[in-house]
Image: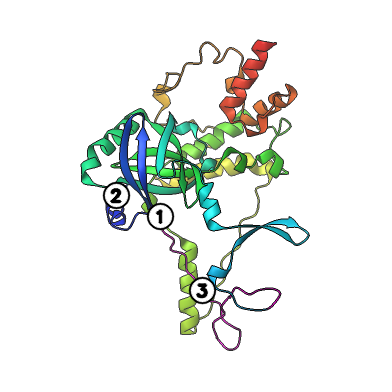
Amino acid sequence: MSFDATTEAMMARAIWTGALTFGLVTVPVGLYTATEDHTVHFHQLQRGTGDRVRYNKINESTGEELDSGDIVKGYDLGGGEYVIVEPEELEEIAPGKSRVIDMAGFVDLDRIEPVFFERTYYLAPQDKEYLKVYELLRAALERSGKAGIATMTMRNKEYLTALRAQDDVLILHTMHWADEVRDPREELDVLPDRQTKVTSQEIETAQQLIDALSMDWDPEQFHDTSEERVKALVDAKRDGQEIVSEAGPPEATNVIDLMEALQRSVEQARSSRGEDKEPAGQLHRLPTHNRDGAGKKQPGKKAGAGHRGADGLESHTKTELYELASKADIPGRSKMNRQQLINALRQRSTAA
C-alpha cells in the first residue's frame, strides 16, 4: 500500500502531541487521523416546506435556549438527583503521564484478536531531528513482527493502544479494554456446539472453495457501493428518472444440498479463473502458500515446552475449549482467548 496519502495527511495538524517511550529511549511524536469518512450526508428538512431543521439545547423546565457555557455534566443518581462534575475536575483526575505513550511490553501482532481494535492513527516524529530514533523503533517492530502495547491519555480519556510498523510509518491502534468486548456465548442465542456435526469431506470441500477463491489483498479492488447507490438515487431523482429497486438477498442454503452447493461453488470459482473443472467427488485439495512449511516451527512461536499435542488441547476449537473450561469450573474463562483457555486447562490438569 502506498503511503503518499499519509505524507499529505502529516501536513495536517496533529490531534495529539506527546512523547513515545520504550525503555530509556524517548521520541516526541504527533498523532494523526489515518482514515476519513466519505459517507453521503443529508440535511434534515421539514416535509412540504423544505426548511432546514435545527436542534437547540433547551432547558426542559423553562424552555429557555442555553449556550454551551451554561451546560455542565451531571451523573444521574436517580429520583431527579444529579452529581455535578465540572470540566476542570475531570482534568484533575485524568490519568498521569497524559502526554506520554509508554510501552509496557511487546506481543506477537497475530496474538491480538481483531475485535479489540477500535480506531487507527498514524504516529510521526515531531521534527526531523527525531527521525533516527523513530526509524529505529519502526524497523525493530517490523523485523520482530511484534506490536508495542501501551496506554495513553487523550481528551481526558485513557486508551489502551497497540503500536506496529507498516511500510515506512508507525501505526497506532486504540483498543477496547477487555471488559468492553462482549462474550459471544452470552450475546448470541445460536452458535455451533458439539451436536453440530460436519463431515471431514464437507470441511475438505469448503477448504477447496477457500483455496479456489484465495487472492492477494488489494484494497483498491473494493469500494463503497452503498455510497454509489445513494448518489445514483439522488442523481436519478434530480433528473426525474425511474428508481430501480435492488434485488433481495439470496435464499439460505438447504442443509441437505450443502455438499452439492459446495462442489458447484468450487467448480464455478475455478471456471471463473480459467482453471480446469474436476468431476464432483474427485476434487483435490489445492496447494496453499505455506503448505511446504506445515509442521515446521514458525518464527517467533514457542514450541510449547512439551505440551503441544501431548494432551490434545491444541486440536480443539475455542468453543470446545470453553466447554472443557466450563466443566473444570475455571474462573474468568468467558474473557479468555483460545491460547489462554489452553494454558488454564493445562494448569488445572497439572494441579490435579
Q: Which residue is mark 1?
A: 35
Dot 1 crowding, Cα within 10 Å, few <14, some 14–19, many 20+: few
Dot 2 crowding, Cα within 10 Å, few <14, some 14–19, many 20+: few
Query: Is residue 168 part of the magenta span, yes or no?
Result: no
Contact between marks 3 and 2 (CB within 8 A): the answer is no
CA gap, disc 3 to disc 2?
31 Å
The structure residue drawn at horizontal position 65% and vertical position 54%, both measured from the top left corner, is 251
The structure residue drawn at horizontal position 57% and vertical position 71%, both measured from the top left corner, is 245
Residue 3 appears anywhere in the view = yes
Q: Position of residue 177 (x, y in %)?
A: 56, 40
Q: Report the number of discs.
A: 3
Q: Residue furthest right?
A: 79
- The residue range painted magenta reads 33-62
Contact between marks 3 and 1 (CB within 8 A): the answer is no
Among the 4 quarters of the image, the one containing residue 349: top right
Among the 4 quarters of the image, the one containing residue 58: bottom right
Give SS at disc 3: loop
Which residue occupies the foreground of this view, 311 or 11?
11
Image quadrant containing the C terminus: top right
Relative placement, left or right, of 193 versus 126 is: right
Q: Position of residue 102 (x, y in %)?
A: 41, 36
CA gap, disc 3 to disc 1?
21 Å
Kindly report the secondary structure that dominates the magenta region of the rendered protein: loop
The structure residue drawn at horizontal position 47% and vertical position 62%, both measured from the top left corner, is 225
Point out which mark residue 42 bears: 3
Q: Which residue is mark 2?
A: 3
CA gap, disc 1 to disc 2?
12 Å
Relative to 247, residue 269 above or below: above
